[in-house]
Amino acid sequence: MNMNLRQVRAFLAVARLGSFTRAAQELHLSQPALTVQIRQLEEQFGITLFDRNTRSVEITRAGVDLAQRLKRIQEDLEDVVAQTRDLAAGVRGTVRLACLQSFASTVLPQAVRRFRQQHPGIGFAIKDVSGNRILEMVRAGEVDFGITEMPPDEPQIEFIALAQARLQVVLPPAHPLCAHAAVGMNDLADVPLILMDRETSARRLVDRAFAMAGCAPRVSCEVVALATALAMVRLGDGVTVLPVADRDAPMHSGVVIRPIDGPTISRWTGIVRRTARTLPVASEAFIALLLGEWREQGHRGHRKTAGMPSGKARTTRPAARRPRSSKKSP
């Protein structure tokens, strides 16, 4: 069947107005052209839609039944068209992202709030999960983009650096190590530690730091949620070691942060997305907001497509020096 939307509109206009003349005027068609569309529709359905003579037009019973069905279809279709146009214009839609818990509990809420003040019709679906899971979700298209540590080189993944976080020691306010300007990893060897789960990128950094110092951690508790580790530290149940960025300060109220006495161990956090993929307008707009805020704060992260030689990386502005990615992610 080759029924088209113009034929449907023509039929519904005649059915509603009871006149070919008025329907043609409303649709800005000539009456012969309108008559042809109705005749084509009757031929396709094999029924008579209107009983007409020189004086009147009356819809048939079959025409009434068809009009009821086609009117619902037309309304649904026009609603789809309107919603699609809104999505294309960024008026409505959903930003789907996955991000590290450290980002989700510090920077993200304020960014979402500012974005929704500008775009109240946009919703968010946020998954605060581990770094490995974020990459999986981005690859599979479960989310539009992710915010995580810099991944290993991968041709299908583009990374846009946002911030660098240094590994630091997080202490209860009354802990004896608070008196130190910096804390060595050896100082932590006999201290009960509350560490992140072994599958997290934060834990991999901590294990690397202990290995470099030639000692092993005394783990009293492993947790998955960053907020849990911080809550336990605030209560004095132990000490934790976490990557901390400058903008993480709101999350660390009620605790004392000390740098590690030794080589600096850090990770880059940024936006990951699939290369050559067009994102929804709302998601692109939110990414632009995040990058804009970082520029205003003086951060100079830049864009790199994983797998592309660093010298050919595209930049959003003059690029600052940053660590090169390797196959072994922090």
Image (spheres, grey):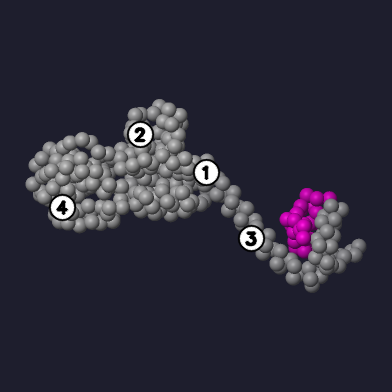
Magenta span: predominant SS is helix
Question: For this view, does 284 lie left or right of residue 330?
Answer: right
**Label 3 secondary element:** helix
Q: Of the residues under marks 4 and 2, which one precedes in the sequence? A: 4
User: Residue lying furthest bottom in this view?
Assistant: 61
Q: Is disc 4 surrounded by few (<14), some (14 to 19) or many (20+) residues within 10 Å?
A: some
What amino acid type is highlighted by mark number 2? Arg
Q: CA distance from mark 1 to mark 2?
A: 24 Å
Residue under the image location 76 percent in, 52 percent down: 27
Q: Is residue 129 left or right of residue 141?
A: left
The residue tagged 3 is 76
Q: Is residue 49 above or below residue 6?
A: below
The residue tagged 1 is 277
Q: Nearer the viewer, residue 218 or 111?
A: 218
Of mark 4 and mark 1, the one earlier in the sequence is: 4
Give the distance between the C-alpha atoms of the residues marked 3 and 1, in whole angstroms: 29 Å
- Answer whether residue 29 is visible to the viewer in this image: yes
Q: How many marks?
A: 4
Frontmost of labels 2 and 3 is: 2
Residue 96 x, y percent position in the rendering: 45, 51
Q: Are marks 3 and 4 in contact (CB under 8 Å)?
A: no
Helix, strand, or loop for circle 1?
A: loop
Residue at 47%, 40% in the rendered image: 155
Magenta residues (range): 1-30
Q: Earlier in the sequence, mark 3 or mark 1?
A: 3
What kind of residue is marked 4? Answer: Arg
Q: CA distance from mark 2 to mark 3?
A: 51 Å
How far apart marks 3 and 4 lie (CA) works out to 62 Å
Q: Which residue is mark 2?
A: 324
Q: Residues within 10 Å of mark 3 (few under 14, many from 20)?
A: few
Kindly identify the amino acid type of the residue bearing the numbered disc 1.
Arg
- Name the image quarter holding the N terminus: bottom right
